[in-house]
Image: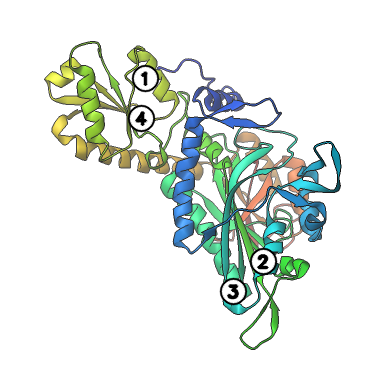
Amino acid sequence: MAKQFVKDVTAMDEDFAQWYTDVVTKADLIDYSSVRGSMIIRPYGYALWDNIKNELDTKLKETGHENVYMPLFIPESLLQKEKDHVKGFAPEVAWVTHGGDEKLQERLVVRPTSETLFCEHYANIIHSYRDLPKLYNQWANVVRWEKTTRPFLRTLEFLWQEGHTAHATQEEAQEETLRMLNVYAQICEEYLAIPVLKGQKTEKEKFAGAESTYTIETLMHDGKALQSGTSHNFGDGFARAFDIKYLDKEGKQQFVHQTSWGFTTRIIGALIMVHGDDRGLVVPPRIAPTQVMIVPIAQHKEGVLDFAYDLKERLGKVARVNIDASDKKPGWKFNEYEMKGIPVRLEVGPKDIENNQVVLARRDSGEKIIVPLNELEVKLPAMLEEIQNDLYNKALNHREENTFTVQTFDAFKAQLEERQGFIKAMWCGDQACEDKIKEETGATSRCMPFEQEHISETCICCSKPAEKMVVWAKAY
């Protein structure tokens, strides 16, 4: 058992919500602002977002997407053009009614999402099949007036990217929708070490105005689900509302087919709740702003600091390395970097220098190993890769151990009372059953997984014939 340096974090099993709050504040990810439900993302929190953003942005460009920027404000009349869309967002929008001292003739919405702005723009610039496809993405902030808020998971304002594409055919739009869902899954699994469940949302849970919505669902340490990225096929619904047409190769007017997809700072909440422990944050190496923190021991002694700085420069070629040369005690430093989840701590003192070695301490397992100086460039990257893989496998094992299969409603309820997690159960497709399950258990349909299993012949709720297996869970 690793020595526990962190003393001031509430234990997860004692109060998970308080544990989460402790971690986001004490690990210097955020601070609270003077506006309810808004957060200040501090440098360490933003560095995490930056790394996620950079990886995703690279993949967006590799798949042919271009970055653009749309205005912050949307005229009310523009938002009203797509009825289902405005109905879906109406309870969450923030309105601007005055400019300076003057009342505006038309209210403006602070963007909750930018479908209508992209649609208006596409109607102006798309004329021919030669203009297609349009593969646009924007990195932006959006505002949704949430009643209950929690840092990263649900805030009035958050950061995200929103992709908006236009295609000649429904087939191309569907291909794009699933391609982007797979990109999100790749970011989560390969960089954040978070296993995902891919599937389609039910009619009730799909995005307002979409024909179909696809999702990646993740399971948190406390057994609750978190929707971690969505991709929507709009069909030609928005195109008809906004009159987005193109001339096809035969000279006929056709409506475009559109997609939209988004990935937000909420994923940092997932990172915290999937990998964190009672000592604080645990950050997977591929996404960590600092992969290795050098802590000099007895740094007041001659040559120790110089040696540590030389190590930083040398190891900077194989990892993202930093050094804490402050006059704080080593115990304080150990506490600080355990809390922040830095993957590897490198300790070096006079005896280590004398023996041509350093000590590497893993944040995830607490394991310490002595490494000869001449092996560092090989052992350190190997350790970082091992930590990355171990974190993924640990999260995957947790998900598998907390995924349950039930065939009756009584078993469904009993399972939720005993232990939360993903619950696989058959569903007839009737929203009345979906509503009843939520009303009686608090669980919602997370998705209809692409990988279907035929658990039984009948619906978990009404016992009518059922062909779809749904994964249910209580969720954030």
Residue in the foreground of this view, choosing between 81 and 333? 81
Residue marked by disc 3: 131
Going from N to C along the chain, the mark reached first, 4 or 3, is 3
Of badges 1 and 2, the one in the foreground is 2
The kind of secondary structure element at disc 4 is loop
Going from N to C along the chain, the mark reached first, 3 or 2, is 2
Q: Look at the image and name its color scheme.
A: rainbow
Question: What residue type is disc 1 on?
Answer: Phe
Crowding at mark 4 (Cα within 10 Å: few <14, some 14-19, many 20+):
few
Check if mark 1's residue and mark 2's residue have beta carbons within 8 Å.
Answer: no
Residue marked by disc 1: 334
Q: CA distance from mark 3 to mark 1?
A: 56 Å
Residue marked by disc 2: 122
Eyeballing the image, is 329 above or below 33?
A: above
Q: CA distance from mark 1 to mark 2?
A: 53 Å
Question: What residue type is disc 4 on?
Answer: Ser
Check if mark 4's residue and mark 1's residue have beta carbons within 8 Å.
Answer: no
Crowding at mark 3 (Cα within 10 Å: few <14, some 14-19, many 20+):
some
One can see residue 432 in this view: no
Q: CA distance from mark 3 to mark 2?
A: 10 Å
